[in-house]
Image (tube, rainbow, N blue to C red):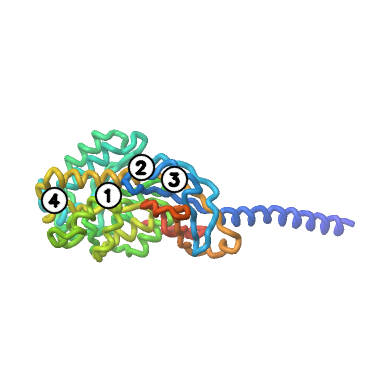
Amino acid sequence: MMRTFLTTQRLTLLSFALLLAAPLAGQTHDICAEASVLLSGIDASGAALANLQPTDFHAEVKGHIVPITSMLAYRGPKRVLILIDASRRMTKEPRSGPWQLIGMLTKDAIHNASPKTSLAIAFYATGDVAGYSGFLSDRNQLIAQFDGVNTEQMFAGRKYNSQLFDALQWALNTLAPAQAGDSIYLLTGGEESRSRASLAEVRQNLLHSGVRLFSYLLPAARPPLPPGSVLHDIVGTSPHIGLFEPLAVYTPVLELARDSGGNIAVEAATRNGFVNPSPVGLKLIEFSEDTLFRQMQTALRIEVTLPPEMIPSRSKPLPLLIVPTVAPGQAHRGWVMNYPKLIPACPAPAADLN
């Protein structure tokens, strides 16, 4: 009798355990069926995209249209880490050249950021990042810290190193755990040398973190374009920042920014670097900077739902495409949209940020 009672009790407990396990498996399934991304961009006039509806675009994953289940305006980001290239190529002329432009861009970003945004600045050249301010809301304190920096003491003996990948790894580690809308604003010549981290590692960690990378590329990022060439005038002035690509000049910053859902601007308003630009040149620089920063500050949070047959594929990142809806006979909208080009794996593997 006692044996029968114990057997019945064991069966009851086993059935109860199976009932508990089923919802847990369902929860994992549901989590991997949902994916959310931040989308930002500009219209044909250069204004930030706003007041969009789900019917304004559709999403594709691996070539299949997937439903957009929700969309919410995101007024962020909450934190922006301004990461500044202090390599010798940037700082050898502290009162002119690229460093003068870096100062202008840094201070404009500090002044123009949303009051709800926390900002931090940090400098890199060698593998060690220096001058990190911590996230502050006091704008004047940040500007005073930038004005007081001495890059010669900060990176003594660094020569021409520019360990970009290591600096980005440090920035991701500093932002961890990342919050929705966190962004890195990279002011750089775009060069990489002697980093311990690889491009593949940085790209993986950037995508898994959800942090977006925006960058203003300075003249040292590329050889000078032929004087009077059309591309010379377009690249730094058009709101369609992606026109940097036809230049056939590679910088890993372009790939990382595009894949993370960020964007780049390129300083091309002067022919011989940033040396005493004309008032018109300054206005062009300010315009491209403002266009880039507006994209960082305004975003939509979009959720898509994957069909059941696609969920097993999320063991690896999935390619994502978001396409503006165009009515029959309607011209292309001319939008430039920024969003992560890959949906991270689910569950995401632990990122190595050290």
Q: Earlier along the polypeptide chain: callout 4 or callout 3?
A: 4
Percent position (x, y) of residue 163?
25, 59
Q: CA distance from mark 1 to mark 4?
A: 20 Å
The residue beneath circle 2 is: 297
Query: Which amino acid does the dot numbered 4 rest on?
Result: Phe
Taking the image as shown, residue 25 lies to the left or right of residue 117, namely: right
Percent position (x, y) of residue 333?
39, 51
Q: Residues within 10 Å of mark 2 (few under 14, many from 20)?
A: many
Query: Which amino acid does the dot numbered 3 rest on?
Result: Leu
Query: Which amino acid does the dot numbered 2 rest on?
Result: Gln
> Which residue corresponds to the image point at 59% horizontal and 64% vertical from the top-left?
309
Query: Which amino acid does the dot numbered 1 rest on?
Result: Leu
Find out whether the residues at labels 3 and 2 contact each other: C-beta distance under 8 Å. no
Q: Residues within 10 Å of mark 1 (few under 14, many from 20)?
A: many
For the residue labelled by badge 1, is the local secondary structure a helix, a strand or a loop?
A: strand
Q: Residues within 10 Å of mark 3 (few under 14, many from 20)?
A: many
Find out whether the residues at labels 1 and 2 contact each other: C-beta distance under 8 Å. no
Q: Single out the mark in the foreground, 1 or 3.
A: 3
> Residue 274 shows which numbered tag?
4
Quadrant of the image for the N terminus? Answer: bottom right
